[in-house]
Amino acid sequence: MNNQHTHGSTPRTHEPETEIALGKGIDLGTANIAAAVQNQDGSITVTLERNAFLDIGDDVYSKNMLTKLKVPYVVHNGKLIVIGESAFELANVFGKNTRRPMSDGLISPGEVDALPVMRMIISKVLGEPRVPGETVCFCIPAESLDVDNNVVYHQGLFQGILGKMGYTARPINEAHAVIFAELADNDFTGIGLSFGGGMVNACIAYKSIPCVQFSVARGGDWIDRNVAQVLGVKQSKACYLKERGVDIRDPKNREEEAVAIYYRNLINYVLQNVKHRFESGQNMPTFNEPVDIACAGGTSMVGGFIEVFREEFGKIDFPIPVGRIFRAEEALTAVAKGCLVAAAIGE
Ligand SMILES: Nc1ncnc2c1ncn2[C@@H]1O[C@H](COP(=O)(O)OP(=O)(O)O)[C@@H](O)[C@H]1O
Ligand SMILES: [Mg+2]
């Protein structure tokens, strides 16, 4: 081992083993931004931050208050900006709503402060590249079936932001990332579904190559909006009801019933669309073995999700044999991990 020489140069002394796999992954979600890096011991650290902010007038009184509350802020365009989880907590104290840089899976068209704020959140969770031009895979949604959305613009913006930070940025579809995170044992063949706040993304891959990718502009926010409407409550209240521990197999009251109804509808809608893609047959390889379905994303965290998913799956006549249907163990961070795996494979 100590006889090793680098090609045509002086003999090398033994170098310390700093073999960290380079490359990072970042999940740019409507609700959460998560960055994944590999540590020296091979474990993975995921840093999560809410994709939200709050702006406060820039005056001495407000500055003092934030300092007293130990809330970090930056001054931007004559306002004090608080980002992420701190913004959420502060919004609660003041009974205000946070502002959101993204909606329905994409950068918000009407939010002028969206880009600078996302730049701040991204640099907070991702940090600097460890070598110049380190690869970062970032997730993007697929074109949506039900709304006209501009994924190209969204992708270009973030490619630019990450590039300016010194990274080599590569986009990957969000559901494809779920396959990278969860279906390694299947040779990255199968169906990945990411149930987010703004969207559901779907990907069907064969040996890591995506054959079909699409999204629907319905997700957790869509459930909240509909539940709020039928119950006559605020959307934030509906979201609270949904997250506080409903079991959609067994709703206990009218509120939970409403949540369960929209969950079933969403799952059925996604499954019907996947089925339709298989039946139309375009770009579809022949799967010889039963394929697995991996689900991830915050919306899949509700109680009874996978059981209801299997029930709805049983009701439709799915065109190909399916093996396991499961939820990622860490549903909220699976996409970020998948982006990291994609970056590592690329390096
Ligand atoms: N325990 C939970 N039960 C149900 N929904 C949840 C739970 N935790 C988070 N969510 C929902 O997950 C969504 C956010 O998921 P996430 O995957 O981070 O979305 P995005 O990819 O859009 O950022 C929100 O709609 C939120 O209400
Ligand atoms: Mg997501």
Image (cartoon, rainbow, N blue to C red):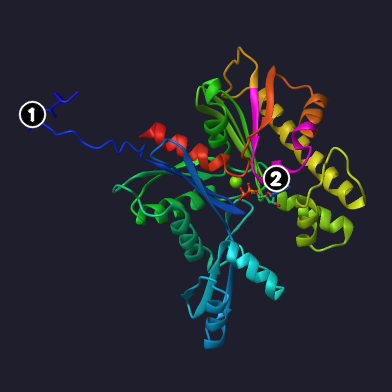
The percent position of residue 7, horizontal first and vertical second, equals: 12, 28
- Up the image or down, 138 lies above or below 232; here it is above
Give the quarter of the figure containing the C terminus: top left
Residue 302 lies in the magenta-colored region: yes
Q: Which numbered circle lies on residue 299?
A: 2
The percent position of residue 58, horizontal first and vertical second, equals: 52, 83
- Up the image or down, 292 lies above or below 76; here it is above
329 or 205: nearer the eye?
329
Label 2, label 1: how far apart the Cα atoms are: 56 Å
Identified at 58% across, 50% down, the residue is 29
Q: Quadrant of residue 322?
A: top right
Which residue is most to the right?
Answer: 253
* Disc 2: residue Cβ within 8 A of ligand 1's nearest atom: yes
The percent position of residue 215, horizontal first and vertical second, equals: 63, 41
Observer able to see residue 183: yes
Identified at 92% across, 49% down, the residue is 253
Q: Give the extent of the magenta segment.
A: 292-307
182 or 189: nearer the eye?
182
Q: Identify the residue under disc 1.
A: 8
Looking at the rendered structure, the secondary structure element under dot 1 is: loop
Which residue is most to the bottom?
Answer: 60
